[in-house]
Structure formats: structure tokens, C-alpha cells
Amino acid sequence: MNRTASKNNKISIRNLTIRYGNFTALSEVSLDIPANEVFGIIGPANSGKTSFLNALNRMDMMRTTMQVEGSVLFNGVDVRSWSNVYALRSKIGVVFPLPVGLPLSIYDNVALSPRLRGIANKSQIDEIVERSLRRAALWDEVKDRLTSLGSLLSGGQQQRLTIARALSQDPEVLMLDEFSIAVDPVTTMRIEDVLKELKQQMTVILVTNLVQQANRLADRTAFFLDGRCVEVGETRALFAGKVTDQRTHDYIEGRFG
Amino acid sequence: MNTRSDLSPTGNAAGDIRNQDWYVDKFFQSAMFVCGISAIVFVIGIFIFVFKEGAGFIIQQMDWAEFFLSPKWRPTSATQATYGTLAMVAGTAAVTVISMAIALPFSFGAAIYIAEFAQGRTREWLKVIIEMLAAIPSVVWGFIGLMIMNPLIIESFDVPIGLNVLNAGIILGLMAAPIITSIAEDAFKAVPDTYREAAEALGATKWQVVYKVILPAAKNGLLSAALLGVGRAFGETMAVLMASGHALTIPGSVFDSIRALTATIAAELGETPVGSDHYQALFAIGIFLFTITFIINMTADFIVRGIKNQ
Amino acid sequence: MNSVSGTHSVRFQAEPINLKNAQVQKLVKIVLGLMAVTLVIPVALIILTLLQKGSPAISWQFLTTFPSNGMTAGGIFPALLGTVWLVAISLLASVPLGVAAAIYLSEYAPQDHWLTRVINLATINLAGVPSIVHALFGLGAFVAFFRLGTSILAASLTLAVMTLPVVIVASWESLQSVPQAFREACWNMGATRWQTIWHVVLPNALTGILTGIILQVSRAAGETAPIMFTGAAFFLPFLPSGIMDQTMALALHLFTISTQVPGVPEEIPFGVALVLFGIVLVVNAFSIWLRMYLRSKKKW
Ligand SMILES: Nc1ncnc2c1ncn2[C@@H]1O[C@H](COP(=O)(O)OP(=O)(O)OP(=O)(O)O)[C@@H](O)[C@H]1O
Ligand SMILES: [Mg+2]
């Protein structure tokens, strides 16, 4: 864990502590995430996973009680030194536990981000929308009804719409927070296949409540427990039992209170 | 503030420029803030401007004892002008009391019915119609007092004049009823369902639940509803001007005509020279009205906040 | 049970509902229902009486001609037009300001901050200030201090200040009903706060805001006290030529002909009251219908 931040690290985190008022949700986390890696985070509820993601794209700015200490380097630059935090966020796509179909048409859902970035050319937006929906494995299902309301899609489709929307940002990092909570197993598998592909083009941070999902997808995995990062290691090694902390093993094996 | 480790270079990241969107956002943040505090600006503005016009009178001319304790309001008397508001205060109070005596039982009853008994369509319709009641302009209410209630009262009670405390009280009661009903209904709705379920599980009838559980639990909300109703009746102008007879007496019965504080301003302001003592005295009444309603509103809010903090 | 007896000691008979209880229950329901109906009856009676006594006066000519013979005959055209002027200009002022204030409160203001608290208190108080005090304010501020004179502009601004809290509250409620998840989604994709408000929050709150504003129209149309010293006149033999002129107004006209002018035939003030009430009622009904329609059309 003490390796120095090399230029290869997309994200380097040092001594990250997150507080809500007096309550410490995450303390002293340090880890590195190289580019083009799928980085898994597992851990029980309330272990601070979502808070961790929020600190990476500076969502603490939008929450009055959330305080962040320590440093988060994105491409080697502290995220807090960004003078335009919105530009930072647009480089990081986020997918939430519950799908959020904005009450716009399917097309407009995906076109929103490019439009906000100032792209006005219709054919260019068409192209981004189609590419993003294809990458999210949703294009075939919705290509004939792009103008219908995004929030009317099924849960699994909406989650892929959310992913397409994140991809329309052309993000350097994609963060997924327990994306499969409201998605059926078949769709989950389809999305997992999508993520394996995406790894070629971006860094993926995958918070998951399913340890086997981390096993299937993540190159390396971190185990969060009670606001601490207990362990970070090669996923294969962790799941083979090569752990430094017994609790990691117990959690992976499903033997956890 | 943040403990930067040695490996956190600052300096510019790729793509980190403050673009137009950033400045637009900053601009609107400030603009919305300025508009956001407008309510404060106006409340202070009202106080300052009303006070400014009445200040000269209050500070130099006004005899406090006379203002509050004398029933004689004779601002136009050439020899000895007096500015006593006691009769108007008494008139306003009488009308307010009658209006609340009418509005409170019916509003609370209606609110209980809507919140706890009525269902589906009935409930929707009741709410809609009560909302309509709230929409009737005060000058139309005053007109109703003048043209419909007046002959009705004269006939029913065999009194010489029907423009009196009773008339204005009924009118103001009906005007205040919708607001009281809707706040009271909110108070009932705020009582958690677990209370109802727990009581019903013990075999209590709906009425017992309401009487022993809901009413006590909602009592702060009801008090606040009553206070806001008082504020509404107290501050009403046109209806009370038209329905109360506008006679400067301390009422001895509900059949006496009275003159309200608000109505006095409405009736006399147009005919007073700007800046005269009389003009300023009317503004002094305005300050008095503002202060009372301010206290009523703050108290009502304080009581409601009390519930939330429990 | 503990949740109940914790705060109030309550004791019920343990036996199941007996006959007597059932009867009491029925009686109570009827009595309460009657109380609710008592509030409904006046609305019905008022509408019927106004219709009965006012409708003979109503005609196209009544709506489109000037009052004549010292307001004892003729129509209400200048008053009707004046009310439209006053309402329209007051909306021009109160809607942008009120919606912006609501946006601040809903989208920017930190919760539990003292300033937010003070703004809320000020809004409540502004709504509770008696209308005649608003009139005094309008006179002192707009007519005298800002030198607008008694004019449509001064009267409209006075109305605007008076109706501002209702616009704020209605808009705030509407903004709050937009799910937080929509905002989170936008922020996370790099949208600025303003972009989020403009592209997602406002469009989804707009119809609700509109409902509030329509309600506002009916309030402003019926107000008398705030305009009677700031820009509305008892009688004017000509139409206003601009916003710096005085105007007649329907509400004030009703007051004038029913209290200040002797010898007006009864059907004229009843006709005016019917027109005024009719406008208010139609606008209100439209707003209520719109609200119900929108509830059935929710996109989320
Ligand atoms: N806005 C907030 N205000 C106060 N406390 C918060 C807030 N958000 C999160 N917390 C607290 O911080 C702790 C960590 O929350 P977080 O959402 O990061 O956990 P998580 O690991 O994502 O849990 P889950 O698996 O349930 O999503 C929890 O105890 C939570 O109650
Ligand atoms: Mg979480």
C-alpha cells in the first residue's frame, strides 16, 4: 500500500477520511487505482463505500455535512485543486444503486451530457447517443422508441440507460455503485459483459454487494469494513484465500454477522 | 484545511478551465440568493416605510395613554383632535372573538372529518369546495354582508341595523374557516399512523382514537391553526369595513355596530392630507396592526416548530 | 401501544366494539360531516344568490361599456380592463422574483442554517401582514418614496409584494416534489447547479408552479385594500394610456358602487360581484383541475 503514486495511477488516494458532522464514515484510506483496471470494492452496508465514491468526484461539495480530509489525486492532480469541479465530474461517470431515468425521452437522457458540454451539432449528438446506447447493450431494445420517456423503461433497461448516460460523458473513470441491486440476473450478466469490454477504454471502479461479482470482474479488490479499508489485493489472490486479515476471508466466504 | 501529503502536486489538470457554464452558474447562484432574501427585505421594508410615515407622530405628538386607552378617535376635530383607538380595538376584538367562535368548531370538525372519516371522492370534493371558500375576494364577502346578511339579521333578530359585530363576525368566520381547516387537517395528517393502529388494535372505535389519541397529539397544530385564523380575522379589511357598520362605539352586544382598526385606515386614508397628524396617526395604527400580526405569526410558527422538534 | 401511552395515558375497554360504541361512532361521523357541510353551504348559497340577482345585469354591453349617470347605470369595461392590467403587471413582478426566491430556498439554501430559517419566517410574516398594511407600505414606498405616484405601476407592485409569499410557497412545494435523485444524477455527470435547475428541475416543476401562479391571479384580482390608495380610482371617464396612469378596478368598483354611490339599482353591484366572483371561481377551478390532471400525468 505504500507504493508511491506513479504516473500510471489514474487515481491515488492518501489518508482519505470522511466525516458527517462528528460521525466518521471512512478513515485513513490510502490506495491506488491504475488506469484501465477494474477496481472492485466490497464490504457490508454502511462501511463507507458510497461515501468513498462521493469523495472521488467531489460530491462532498453538494452535501453540507460531508467533510473530506486527505488527498485524492486524479491523473496526479488533487481533485480539490480543480478550479472547475464540473469539468472534473464530467470525466467521471457514475451509476447509482437504483436506476435514475430522468423524466426525459430516452434520446434526451443520453444526449443531456453532451449538450451540457456544449455540443450542439445534431449529427454529432446522434452519433454519441447511438454509440453510448450500443456500448450499454441497450441500443437494439430502444432504437425504435428513442423519443419515449426514459423513466417508463423496465428497471434493468433503465439501469443500462443510466450506464449509457454515464458513457455519453466519454468518462475516463466509470464508478458503479451496487448497480445490480434492482436488476435481474440476466441483465446483470449482460452489464457485466459490457464492463469487461469497457475496461479497454477506461478505469472502472465497481462497488458491489455481491462478492462473486467482484471475483468475476475486478482485477484488484478492496475490502471496506466499518469505515476502514481492511485489505487491498489482487482479486484472484484474495479469493484464493491469500489474505492478510482474517475478516476479509470471512466476508468473502459469506461467514459474516 | 486539507492535509496534503508530499505527493499531491497542485497545478493545472488537463481540461480544468473555468468556462462559460461555470461563470453562468456563479452568476445565477448570486442572483437566486438576492431574490431569495427578498422576503426579508420586504418585511423589513414594510416596517421601515410604515414606521417612517408614522414615526413623527408617534415620537412627538402621540399620547400613548390616549392612543391605547381612549375610545375617542376624533382626528378631524378642529379644536381638540384626539387619537384614541380603544373603541376600535374593542370592536376588532369583538368581531375576532365572534368569528373564531364560529370558525373554530366548524373548521376543526370539518378538518377531523376530512382527515379521519371522509374517503375518496367525498374528501376530494370537500377540500376543493373549502378551497373555493378561501378564494372568494374579501370585497365580495363585504358585499354579501352588506346586501344579504344585513337584511337577514334585521329580520331574524328584529334589530334596527344588521351591520354589526354579528354580521362581520360571521363573515370573518367564514373567511378564516378554510385556512384554519387546512392547517388543522395538516396537523391531523402529521400524527403518525402507528398511533392510530396501536389504538385501533386495542379495539378503540374511530371516534375514540380521534378523541383520545389524535386530538391530544395534534393539539399544537390546532393551536397554531387557531392563531393564524385570529391573525386572518384581525387583519381583514374590506369585508369588515362593509359589514360592521363602521360606527365608533365600544360594543355592548353582538348587535352593536363597530369600527375595526383596519377599516379605519381604509376609510380615512384617502381623505387625509399627506403628512398631517391624522395621516400619520393612521400609519401609527398600521404599525400597531403590523406588530400584532407579526407576534401572532411568530407565535404560531414557534408552536408548530415545537411539534417538529419533539 | 407503548408508542401511544408513552406520551398520553390512554385506556380503552379491552372488549370488542359494542353496540353503543358503534352508535356513537355513527353519530360522531354524521355530526362531523355536517360541520364540514356547513362550510360548504355558504359557497353554494352565495353562488346561487349572486347568480339570481346578478345575472340580469350581465350582458355583452355591461362588460364592454363605461359606467354612466354617476355610476348608477352602464357597464364595467374600464374596471374590468383595469383589473387585467393590475393583475398582469403584478404577475410580471412577483412571478420571476417569487420563483427565483423559491429556487434559492429549494436548491441553494443550506438546510438548518439561520438565514434559511429567517427567510422562511419572513415569508410567513409577509403572508400574514394585513392587506391594509400592504396598502400603507405601497403608499409610503412606491407612491411616495420611489415617486411612482398613484399609478397602475405602484398599485401592481403593491399587489406583487402582497402576493409574493404565495408564489414562493407554491413554487417551493413544486420544486421540492422533484425527486432528489434527478439532481444527483445531473450533478454526478458534471452539470452545474444552474444547468441542473434549468434543464431538469424547473421543467419538471413548471406545471406545479403554474398552478400556484394561476391561483395567484385569482387572489390578485380580488384584492381591494392594497390598490385603493396606490393606483386604483373610484371613477375615471377614460382608459389608462400607460402604466403611470391611474385605473379603475373591478374589486374597488364593487366597493364604490355598493357603499359610496347612492341610488345604484341593485342588479348592478350584484352583477359586478358576480363577474368578480366568476373570474375568481373560473381561475380557481382551472387551477384545481390542472393540479388533478397533472397528478394523473406524473412522469415518475
Ligand atoms: N449524508 C449523510 N449524512 C450523515 N451520515 C451519512 C450520510 N451519508 C452516509 N452517512 C453515513 O455514513 C456511513 C457510510 O455510508 P455509506 O453510504 O458510504 O455506506 P455504504 O458502504 O455505501 O453502505 P451501503 O452498502 O448500504 O450502500 C453510514 O453509517 C451512513 O449512515
Ligand atoms: Mg452505498
Image (cartoon, coloured by chain):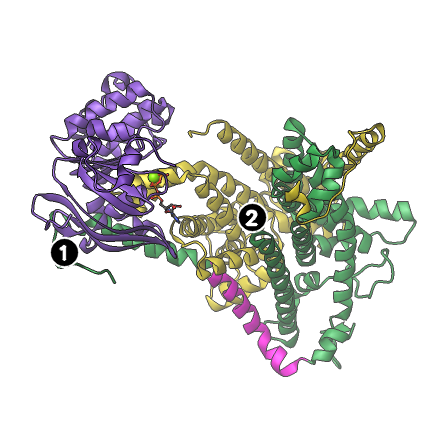
* Amino acid type of the residue that numbered disc 2 sits on in the rendered structure: Ala
Dominant SS of magenta comes to helix
Ligand 1 sits in quadrant: top left
- The answer to whether tags 1 and 2 share a subunit is no
Colour in which chain C is drawn: yellow
| Residue A95 in sight here | no
Residue C191 horizontal/vertical position (percent): 27, 43
Q: Would residue A61 be visible to someone looking at this image?
A: yes
Circle 2 residue: C220
Look at the numbered disc 2 and give the secondary structure of its residue.
helix
Instruction: Report, in whole angstroms, how far the alpha carbon at label 1 lies from the one at label 2.
Output: 60 Å
- Output the letter for the chain in green: B
Q: Within the magenta stretch, is there residue B51?
A: yes
Tag count: 2
Q: Which residue is mark 1?
A: B8
Marking on residue B23: none
Q: Range of the magenta residues?
A: B39-62
Q: Is residue A99 left or right of residue C113?
A: left
Q: Which residue occupies the foreground of this view, B242 or C81? A: B242
Measured from the top left, where is residue C199 in percent x and y?
32, 39
The quarter of the image holding the N terminus of chain B is bottom left
